[in-house]
């Protein structure tokens, strides 16, 4: 079964930015997150983008061909584990390599490799969205929204790139954090923030799926809360009713019910006949019918008198009439 991460990546792999600045931003993020530079002994060089995602490799090749006229070669490697494959898009030739690295602001004018994210590359919101889309597509993951906790993260081996990515995500309002576990992980937590991130990078179907699951979970939690509250109230009412029955039985055993006013004797009889009834139900059974408030008032008076008649202490009558 496809994971939520895989479905999300498949969705954004189908998004092809039209403006060249956004194409540069997305390719630059992919190259920084999943790319590698190989310098060989004969001074030839190659740039590779490696991933287990065929849609990522296909998208990278199409963008390079369409917008930069740079050819690429796809290599498929069998990893031998659960029929998983590793895909590699390779660009060869010193001129092609230098051009693509320069175009994507990875190679400076002084031929120095840059891990930082150039501000010129992510000046506009559309370019920022493209850059974050590329980074997530290359090394991102998101937990199944059915699980209790919501978590999205992007991994990278490069500290400078991690710090830049963290800054960019916070600049876009996503409250990102960073931790280190053999690699750097820039993460976002919380359904609302993750949903906004998915919508920002164009993963609209994933955003709607997350929102739907979130609504269902919130409704389920609310139902559980109401059920728990109702159960607690019911248990409290049952305990109060049983205490009332015990006190009335004690009055009856000592032949003290006759000392009660007629309305309280009638209430005592109702409580003994209907020990499980709520105060509202006792009011409905009274002749004439009484409100819950009236029954509660009479029950308090009954228990107060019982305390005096029986000489009991600490009956906590206030706790017995909810």
Image: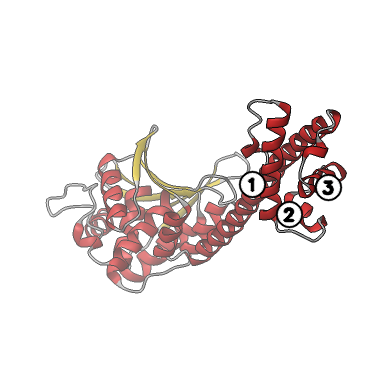
Which residue lies under the disc numbered 3? 270
Separation (CA) of disc 2 from disc 1: 18 Å
Work out whether mark 2 precedes mark 1 in sequence or the reverse, and give the earlier one: 1
Residue 82: x and y, percent?
63, 41
Q: Are discs 2 and 1 less than 8 Å apart at CB?
A: no
Of residue 299 and residue 90, the one placed in the foreground of this image is 299
Work out whether mark 2 precedes mark 3 in sequence or the reverse, and give the earlier one: 3
Which residue lies under the disc numbered 1? 229
Q: Residues within 10 Å of mark 3 (few under 14, many from 20)?
A: some
Which residue lies under the disc numbered 2? 280
> From the image, which quarter does the C terminus lie in?
top right
Q: Residues within 10 Å of mark 2 (few under 14, many from 20)?
A: some
Residue 255 vs 220, above or below: the answer is above
Quick one: which residue is furthest to the bottom in this view?
18
Of residue 106 and residue 231, the one placed in the foreground of this image is 231
Q: Is residue 72 left or right of residue 249?
A: left
Quick one: which residue is furthest to the right in this view?
273
Q: Are discs 3 and 1 less than 8 Å apart at CB?
A: no
Front label number (2 vs 1): 2
- Determine the secondary structure under disc 1: helix
Q: Residues within 10 Å of mark 1 (few under 14, many from 20)?
A: few
Q: Is residue 80 left or right of residue 29?
A: right
Of residue 155 and residue 153, the one placed in the foreground of this image is 153
Front label number (2 vs 3): 3
Residue 285: x and y, percent?
82, 56
Separation (CA) of disc 3 from disc 1: 27 Å
Q: Residue at x 62, y 44 (%)?
A: 83
Q: Quadrant of residue 237?
A: top right
């Amino acid at each position: 079964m496809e994971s939520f991460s895989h479905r999300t990546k498949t969705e954004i792999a189908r998004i092809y930015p039209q403006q060249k600045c956004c194409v540069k931003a997305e390719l630059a993020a992919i190259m920084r997150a999943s790319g590698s530079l190989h310098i060989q002994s004969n001074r030839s060089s190659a740039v590779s983008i490696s991933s287990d995602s065929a849609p990522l490799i296909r998208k990278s090749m199409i963008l390079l061909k369409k917008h930069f006229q740079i050819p690429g070669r796809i290599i498929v490697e069998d990893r031998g584990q659960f029929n998983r494959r590793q895909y590699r898009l390779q660009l060869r030739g010193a001129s092609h390599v230098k051009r693509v690295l320069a175009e994507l602001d990875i190679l400076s004018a002084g031929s120095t490799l840059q891990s930082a994210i150039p501000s010129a590359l992510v000046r506009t919101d559309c370019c920022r969205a493209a850059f974050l889309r590329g980074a997530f597509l290359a090394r991102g993951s998101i937990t199944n929204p059915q699980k209790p906790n919501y978590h999205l993260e992007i991994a990278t081996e490069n500290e400078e790139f991690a710090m830049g990515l963290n800054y960019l995500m916070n600049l876009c309002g996503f409250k990102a954090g960073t931790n280190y576990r053999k690699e750097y992980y820039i993460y976002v937590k919380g359904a609302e923030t993750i949903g906004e991130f998915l919508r920002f990078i164009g993963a609209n179907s994933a955003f709607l799926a997350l929102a739907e699951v979130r609504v269902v979970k919130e409704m389920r939690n609310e139902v559980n809360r109401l059920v728990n509250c109702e159960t607690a109230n019911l248990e409290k009412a049952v305990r109060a009713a049983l205490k009332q029955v015990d006190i009335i039985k004690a009055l009856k055993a000592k032949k003290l019910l006759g000392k009660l006013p007629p309305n309280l004797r009638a209430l005592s009889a109702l409580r003994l006949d209907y020990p499980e009834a709520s105060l509202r139900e006792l009011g409905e059974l009274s002749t004439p019918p009484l409100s819950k408030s009236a029954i509660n008032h009479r029950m308090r008076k009954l228990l107060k008198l019982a305390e005096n008649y029986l000489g009991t202490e600490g009956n906590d009558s206030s706790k017995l009439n909810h």
